[in-house]
Image: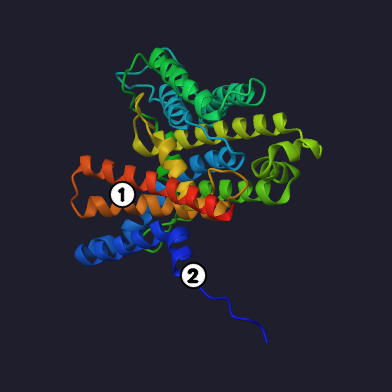
Amino acid sequence: MTATKKINIKDFLINNGIIVVLVLLAIITAIKQPTFATSDNAINIALNVAPRFIIACGVSGCLITRGTDLSAGRMVGLAACLAGTLLQKPDYSGKFFPNLPHFGIWWVVAVLLICVAVCAIFGLINGLVVSYLQVPAFIGTLGMQLIVYGVCLVYTNATPIGGYRSAYSEVAKGRFLAIPNYFKGIPYLFLIALAVGIVIWFIYNKTPHGKYMYAIGGNEQAAEVSGVNTKKTKIIIYVTAAALYALGGFLVGAKSGGSSVNMGMGWELEAIAACTIGGVSVNGGIGRVSGVLIGVLVFEILKTCLQYLGVDTNYQYIAQGIVIVVAIALDIRKYIAKK
């Protein structure tokens, strides 16, 4: 006869308290605002979640190895601005590069690769600073946050960017298998995020790199003694994260139809909070891609609920800040309880 495992209410609330509260908030919002619980709103939330999930996947690798990346949001903004300046309409009056030739559809892919390459360089520097110079990730990436922001300001001269060509906008707004009057199709954004999630899941769970990553987060010294090249692994993590930020910024720019140097500001904190809500520990060694998705979804639902309830934008920032602090505090509480 097998023993039945008793559910500890206290532990359940510590592990899932934020999720429970936000689910209740969503139910209350749906009751007060029936338009909240509609398929159109669900699709809108999914489209907002997609690029943030990609960004959070990048941050999750840093957290799992007991690091962090505070430059994520600024890299998102840099990628969005870089893509925007290179993918404007030929006849747009405020074109950033007036003499830039009009290339074919392949240029959209080329620009994405340029964004990834540029951000990967900053990610490489982050990895080198954290692994070889042994600068705490918090400090090293905070410095990189300012550097990337400064580079973006110098590059754009703080000029708002718009007038995108349709091929670029279609990346975020287009749909796959759309049938007029019958089926709206599957948004490309959703498919891209799904593909990224599958790839990251495979890397985390089925490759030596994933095993090394969790080993470093669990005990870096023990991992190094057992033969793990911790420096190389960390560099790969930060470069991969930066590449994901570039992809996220590229998609956010296409979805927004415009960009500026402030795009992506503070998104690294949202990503860290979402990861923590989803079970990725800031103390390292723990985290799943499915949890990251849940965390991002929960955080996005919070913002949508506050908007539907008519909460002033200023108070929305306060609520989001409280969620971030509580999420980190509960994660630390779980870590202390395990010790």
Q: CA distance from mark 1 to mark 2?
A: 30 Å
Task: Name the foreground residue: 191 vs 229.
Answer: 229
Callout 2: helix, strand or loop?
loop
Q: Residue at x 38, y 63 (%)?
A: 20
Residue hosting label 2: 8
Q: Residue at x 35, y 18 (%)?
A: 95
Q: Residue at x 39, y 56 (%)?
A: 18
Image mark count: 2
x, y percent for residue 261: 36, 23
Q: Residues within 10 Å of mark 2 (few under 14, many from 20)?
A: few
Task: Name the foreground residue: 219 vs 102.
Answer: 219
Residue hosting label 1: 303
Q: What amino acid is labelled 1 in the image? A: Lys
x, y percent for residue 312: 18, 44
x, y percent for residue 2: 66, 83
Task: Name the foreground residue: 156 vs 224.
Answer: 224
Q: Is residue 80 left or right of residue 288?
A: left
Q: Is residue 28 left or right of residue 119?
A: left
Above/below status of 192 relative to 232: below
x, y percent for residue 162: 33, 27
- For the rendered model, the colour scheme is rainbow
**Quadrant in which the N terminus appears:** bottom right
Q: Residue at x 34, y 30 (%)?
A: 258
Q: Earlier along the polypeptide chain: callout 1 or callout 2?
A: 2
Callout 1: helix, strand or loop?
helix
Above/below status of 88 relative to 271: above
